[in-house]
C-alpha cells in the first residue's frame, strides 16, 4: 500500500484555552466526545477536561504546567481525540498512518484503536499517578537550534554526560533533558558559542534516564489496561518502528519516558514511503512547522492552529488535495451555502492602510528587536509561546507596543492573546481594534 496521509499527534505544548468552544457548539460529535471523556475523567478522580477546552478564559499553558499538570494532560488527550473523531467520523478523512510526538504517542495509541477511549484516558492518568508515586529528581528540558547529531557532539565536547538528546524535532531543532543544574550549565555554554537555547516550561526531564523509576511504575500500572491490535497503521517515533499489537504497546509504554523521540527520522521515513500530507490532530500547529522544516514541499494542515468554528474547519479541510483517496466531507445538517463555501477574499484595504504583509513585517522587526532574536526566526506562522518561548505576559507587553505603533487602542477590558500567538494572527487582529480617538477611521498612521 502506498501511504499518502499521516495524522500527527502533538505533545505537552499543544494546549489553547477554550480551543474547542466554537467547534463544540457547531459539531455534536465534539460535544459528545467531551461529555464522554468528562465522565471518564471524573471516575478517574480527575477534573473534567471540558472546563479547559470550552472556556476561552481558562488557565493558560504555563499556569497549568506549574500548578495542575495532570489537568493539562487530560485536556491534551481530550482535545486531540475530539479532533481525530471529527476528522475521521464526521469528515471521513482516512489516514494511512498515525504518528505521535512524545505525549502524543499515548493519544496516537488510542486513536489507532489499541485502547478504547476510556482506557486511553486511564493510561494518561496512570502516567501522572506514576510520577506521584515515584517523584523523580529535579530536572528539565532545553530547546536548542541545532541538529540532534551536532547537539550530541556539543554535549560530548563539553563533557556534559548528564544531559542527553530527548527529542530530535527537525534538522535544525532538538531538545535536551537532564538534571536542572547540568541543563543550566549547557544552556549558558550553548549560548556562549552562538547556539540559541531556550529553557522549556516542563516539570520533569522527560525522555531521560532520570525517569527510570517513574517508567517502571508507569509500566506496572499500565499493565492493568487491555491493549489490543490496532485498526490504523501506527508508527512510533520512540521505538522507531510500527506498533500493531499488545506486546508492542507494552514496549512503547516502558520506553515512553526514558527513550528519545526521533521525530525527524519518523517524518523522513513516512515521506519516503509515500506520505505527502500531514494533518496535525491537536491545537496550535507546532508539529506542522517541524514537518515542513524536515521535508520541504509536503503539505501540512493544522486545523486547530487557532480557535475555529465548524464551517471554518469544513472550508479548510475542503482545500486539501487528498480527495483522490477519501470521499469529500458532507455536513450532517443543512447550513447556508455561504458558510460552506471558500472564505471570500477580504475587502482591499484603503491605499493609506498597510497591507497584511507590511503589518507582519513591522511586527517582525519590533518583536525581533525587543526579544533579541534574528528576524528570520520570527516567521509569520511561528508560535510565539510554543516555538519561541515567549510567555503570555511578554506577548501582551509587545502587542501593546504594536497597537500604539499602528495608531490603534486596546479595548478597556484588554485583549486576551491566547488565540493570537503568531505574527500572522496578530496582523489579522490589529485592524479589528478601534483607532486612537485622535485618528479618523481608515487613517491610522503607517509605521
Image: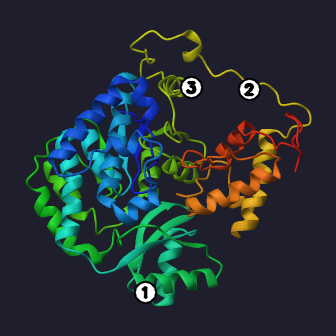
SS class of the residue under badge 1? Answer: helix
In the figure, is residue 123 to the left or right of 55? left
SS class of the residue under badge 2? Answer: loop
> The N terminus lies in which quarter of the figure?
top left
Figure quadrant of residue 437? top right
Q: Which mark is residue 346?
A: 2
Q: Which mark is residue 181?
A: 1
| Residue drawn at (23%, 35%) of the image | 36
Task: Please provide percent x and percent y for residue 315.
Answer: 55, 23
| Residue drawn at (71%, 36%) of the image | 432
In the figure, is residue 196 to the left or right of 28? right
Residue 174, compared with residue 244, is above or below; it is below
Q: Residue furthest bottom?
A: 159
Decide: few, some or many residues near mark 1? Use Cα within 10 Å; few <14, some 14-19, many ≥20. Answer: few
Q: Earlier in the sequence, mark 2 or mark 1?
A: 1
Q: Which mark is residue 319?
A: 3
Residue 401, compared with residue 189, is above or below; it is above
Whole-Å distance between the Cαs marked 3 and 2?
18 Å
CB of mark 3 within 8 Å of CB of mark 1?
no
Circle 3 or circle 2, nearest the eye: 2
Q: Residue furthest left?
A: 224
Q: Earlier in the sequence, mark 3 or mark 1?
A: 1
SS class of the residue under badge 3? Answer: loop
Which sits in the foreground, 344 or 216?
Answer: 344
Which sits in the foreground, 390 or 50?
Answer: 50
| Residue drawn at (86%, 34%) of the image | 442
Circle 3 or circle 1, nearest the eye: 1
Whole-Å distance between the Cαs marked 3 and 1?
48 Å
Whole-Å distance between the Cαs marked 2 and 1?
52 Å
Amino acid at each position: 500500500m502506498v501511504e499518502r496521509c499521516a495524522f500527527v499527534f502533538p505533545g505537552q505544548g499543544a494546549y489553547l484555552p477554550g480551543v474547542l468552544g466554537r467547534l463544540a457548539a457547531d459539531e455534536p460529535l465534539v460535544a459528545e466526545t467531551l461529555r464522554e471523556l468528562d465522565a471518564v475523567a471524573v471516575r478517574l478522580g480527575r477534573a473534567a477536561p471540558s472546563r479547559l477546552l470550552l472556556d476561552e478564559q481558562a488557565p493558560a499553558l504555563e499556569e497549568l504546567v506549574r500548578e495542575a499538570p495532570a489537568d493539562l494532560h487530560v485536556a491534551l488527550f481530550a482535545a486531540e481525540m475530539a479532533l481525530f473523531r471529527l476528522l475521521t467520523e464526521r469528515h471521513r478523512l482516512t489516514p494511512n498512518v498515525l504518528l505521535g510526538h512524545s505525549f502524543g504517542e499515548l493519544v496516537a495509541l488510542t486513536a489507532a484503536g489499541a485502547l478504547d477511549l476510556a482506557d486511553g484516558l486511564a493510561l494518561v492518568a496512570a502516567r501522572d499517578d506514576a510520577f506521584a508515586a515515584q517523584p523523580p529528581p529535579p530536572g528539565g528540558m532545553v530547546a536548542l537550534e541545532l541538529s540532534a547529531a551536532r547537539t550530541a557532539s556539543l554535549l560530548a565536547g563539553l563533557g556534559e554526560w548528564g544531559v542527553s538528546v530527548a527529542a530530535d524535532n527537525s534538522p535544525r531543532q532538538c531538545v535536551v533533558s537532564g538534571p536542572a543544574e547540568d541543563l543550566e550549565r549547557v544552556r549558558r555554554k550553548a549560548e556562549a558559542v552562538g547556539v540559541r537555547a531556550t529553557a522549556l516550561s516542563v516539570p520533569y526531564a522527560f525522555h531521560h534516564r532520570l525517569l527510570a523509576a517513574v517508567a517502571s511504575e508507569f509500566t506496572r500500572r499500565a499493565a492493568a489496561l487491555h491493549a489490543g491490535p490496532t485498526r490504523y497503521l501506527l508508527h512510533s517515533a520512540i521505538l522507531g518502528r510500527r506498533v500493531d499489537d499488545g506486546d508492542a504497546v507494552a514496549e512503547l509504554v516502558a520506553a515512553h519516558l526514558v527513550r528519545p523521540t526521533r521525530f525527524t527520522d519518523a517524518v523522513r521515513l513516512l515521506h519516503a514511503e509515500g506520505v505527502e500530507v500531514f494533518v496535525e490532530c491537536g491545537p496550535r500547529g507546532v508539529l506542522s512547522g517541524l514537518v515542513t522544516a524536515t521535508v520541504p514541499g509536503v503539505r501540512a494542515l493544522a486545523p486547530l492552529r487557532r480557535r475555529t468554528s465548524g464551517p471554518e474547519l469544513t472550508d479548510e479541510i475542503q482545500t486539501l488535495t487528498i480527495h483522490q483517496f477519501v470521499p469529500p466531507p458532507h455536513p450532517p445538517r443543512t447550513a447556508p451555502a455561504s458558510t460552506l463555501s471558500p472564505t471570500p477574499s477580504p475587502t482591499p484595504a484603503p491605499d493609506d492602510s498597510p497591507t497584511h504583509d507590511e503589518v507582519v513585517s513591522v511586527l517582525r522587526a519590533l518583536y525581533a528587536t525587543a526579544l533579541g532574536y534574528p528576524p528570520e526566526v520570527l516567521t509569520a506562522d511561528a508560535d510565539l509561546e510554543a516555538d519561541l518561548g515567549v510567555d503570555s505576559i511578554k506577548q501582551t507587553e509587545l502587542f501593546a507596543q504594536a497597537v500604539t505603533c499602528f495608531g490603534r487602542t486596546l479595548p478597556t477590558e484588554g485583549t486576551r492573546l491566547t488565540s493570537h500567538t503568531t505574527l500572522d494572527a496578530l496582523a489579522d487582529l490589529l485592524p479589528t481594534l478601534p483607532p486612537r480617538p485622535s485618528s479618523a477611521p481608515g487613517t491610522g498612521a503607517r509605521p
